[in-house]
Image (spheres, rainbow, N blue to C red):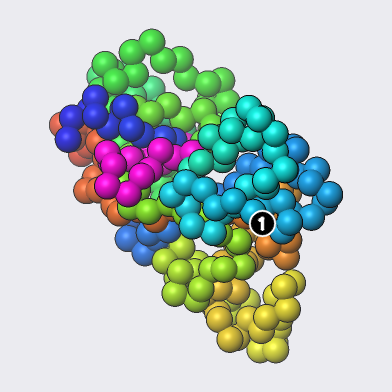
Amino acid sequence: MTTAAVASSSVPMVFSGPSVRAIGALTKTVTRRLVRLPPWLVRHGGDLEQAWADTLYGVTPGLHVPCSGQGDEKNETVQRLRNPYGFVVGGPPVWIWVKETWRPEIDPRIPGVVVRYAADGERYVFHAASAAGWTAPRCARTGNVTPLYMPKWASRMLLRVTDVRAERLHAITEEDAEREGAPKFFDRFASIARDQRLTSGELAAEAPHRAGFAVLWDEINGDRALWKTNPWVWRIAFSHTVGSKKRDVRWQNHTSIASH
């Protein structure tokens, strides 16, 4: 696999600290992301079920578009909604490069850029050539940097997409919640009564990983779409690669890093 091949078919994706740790532990192989509905779909009488009720399209079973769209507007909308990650079964590989909370550090003793990752405290050193023309964000002087500012060269994880489909959030099974890396609900909330129900009505004890996922979903996405609203999501499955595609391993174990 060449660097050029990766660059031509790769997409960035932000992951939280717990998700990064689960990916690193090889316990997370699935992620879910909100489907971005165009405004005219959202305005479809306020009834999203009806808005998605007519024409099955593309490579994502279960995802529908309304037949009420007219002309180019409908065609353009279908193209925008078609799986935005570029994955097609049997097509060329698609890769995800992980964006996470990080902090770049300049050490004059090292011919490169030290990157510390907040999820687990690991430090990697990237050769100066990788960061050519890059300027450290000001906030790095005092603390961690949002994943939004992570450049591709600083990403340490590369994931290969194996499947993409659209479904409602509540379609997640107990097994798939475990593939999401979600902890069991009562492992996090041991003091809560066993008859605790989710906001969607199910008993947490009947599907503990699913309940744990519902809590994580609201912690990460609550300001956009709560679990109880059962939004449309992209279910993205992936496999792991070994190590980082960009890390300069010659400097990985530099003594100045080990002394931190």
Q: Is residue 183 magenta?
A: no
For image coordinates 29% across by 52% down, the residue present is 240
Q: Tell me, yes or no, if residue 224 can be seen here.
A: yes
For image coordinates 73% across by 65% down, the residue present is 228
Q: Secondary structure at mark 1?
A: loop
Residue 129 placed where, x, y %? 26, 16
Q: Specify the farthest residue to the right.
A: 45
Q: Specify the farthest residue to the top.
A: 133
> In this rendering, would 43 be left or right of 88?
right
**Amino acid type, mark 1:** Ala
Residue 29 placed where, x, y %? 38, 59
10 Å neighbourhood of mark 1: few (<14), some, or many (≥20)?
some
- Residue on which the image places disc 1: 53
Residue 257 placed where, x, y %? 29, 36
* Residue 248 location, quadrant: top left
Magenta stretch, overall SS: loop
Q: In the rendered image of this protein, does residue 187 appear above or below residue 93?
A: below
Judging depth in this view, the residue of 54 and 214 nearest the camera is 54
Query: In the image, which residues are magenta?
Result: 84-102
Q: Quadrant of the N terminus?
A: top left
For image coordinates 49% across by 57% down, the residue present is 61
For image coordinates 29% across by 20% down, the residue present is 130
> In this rendering, would 172 be left or right of 42?
left
Q: Tell me, yes or no, if residue 116 can be seen here.
A: no
Q: Quadrant of the C terminus?
A: top left
Q: Is residue 98 magenta?
A: yes
> In this rendering, would 78 be left or right of 20?
right
